[in-house]
Image (cartoon, rainbow, N blue to C red):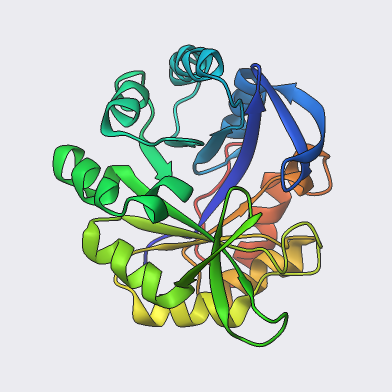
């Protein structure tokens, strides 16, 4: 049985990890490289770094940061944020990233998934999907872009299938209904994605405690759980989380500490 993965997510602006809700009300929580090294030592299975710098200068700085991260950690890491061309993806992969994450740009130009997967392989491509129910609580999931601010006509499950067919190696789904609430994940959605897709599904949005993560990896059948605040602010440590998961019968890789 493949081990479930625990993935801290680090939003990066000007070399610092920041946290807010939907990229608003941001405050610095630590150094991007240093936090990555700490999480790797604590037993994180992978990391996700998202570049939220908007300028071209910020993009160049982020590529340099990716090189530093690659030198500092020994676990796989994914980078995303504004990747809109195969050249941009190539720069990040050449700098040492193990995978790239596409979101708004993939919805705008789905062929981008195909081109990057054809050039580098599906294992390098994560398609991130942010979706919310329209109207709220209806079960009608619509994809959004630009950090959840722009609603599209794309339906969650149809888009996940298309992304898979175009070459995505993983789907990272964030429920915008649950994101930032710390009240648990949309487990029924992850279970359906798991049943319908052939590729791994990463759960994001809503983690508030250990029980939430246990639930999404069991009832929700997600292949990995991604979280930010609960790790950044010390609400849950990765060793204690993995211990609880193992006690709940979830197959996880052991921690070194």
Examine the rendering and report whether any part of residue 5 can be seen.
yes
x, y (%) of residue 174?
59, 61
Q: Residue 165 versus residue 199: which sits nearer the camera?
A: 165
Looking at the figure, which quarter contains the C terminus?
top right
Residue at image point 27% right, 33% down: 86
x, y (%) of residue 242?
63, 54
Q: Quadrant of residue 218?
A: bottom right
Q: Quadrant of residue 84?
A: top left
x, y (%) of residue 233?
83, 39
Examine the rendering and report whether any part of residue 103 can be seen.
no
Furthest-left residue in view? 118
Looking at the figure, which quarter contains the N terminus?
bottom left
Residue at image point 41% right, 46% down: 105
Residue at image point 28% right, 26% down: 87
Q: Horizontally, is 37 left or right of 100 in the view?
A: right
Q: Horizontally, is 214 left or right of 103 in the view?
A: right
């Amino acid at each position: 049985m493949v081990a479930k993965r625990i993935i801290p997510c680090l939003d990066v602006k000007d070399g610092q990890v920041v946290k807010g809700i939907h990229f608003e009300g941001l405050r610095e929580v630590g150094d991007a490289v240093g936090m990555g090294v700490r999480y790797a030592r604590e037993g994180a299975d992978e990391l996700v770094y998202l570049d939220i710098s908007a300028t071209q200068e910020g993009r160049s700085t982020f590529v340099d940061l990716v090189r530093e991260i690659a030198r500092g950690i020994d676990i796989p890491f994914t980078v995303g944020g504004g990747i809109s061309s195969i050249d941009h993806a190539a720069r990040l992969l050449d700098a040492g990233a193990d995978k790239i994450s596409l979101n708004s740009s993939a919805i705008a130009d789905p062929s981008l998934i195909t081109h990057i997967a054809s050039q580098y392989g599906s294992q390098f491509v994560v398609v991130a999907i942010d979706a919310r129910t329209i109207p709220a609580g209806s079960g009608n999931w619509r994809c959004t872009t630009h950090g959840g601010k722009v609603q599209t006509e794309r339906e969650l499950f149809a888009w996940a299938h298309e992304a898979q067919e175009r070459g995505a190696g993983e789907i990272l789904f964030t429920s915008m209904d649950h994101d930032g609430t710390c009240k648990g994940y949309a487990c029924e959605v992850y279970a359906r994605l798991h049943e319908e897709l052939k590729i791994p599904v990463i759960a994001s949005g809503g983690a508030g405690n250990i029980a939430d993560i246990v639930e999404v990896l069991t009832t929700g059948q997600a292949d990995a759980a991604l979280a930010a605040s609960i790790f950044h602010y010390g609400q849950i440590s990765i060793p204690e989380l993995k211990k609880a998961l193992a006690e709940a019968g979830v197959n996880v890789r052991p921690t070194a500490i």
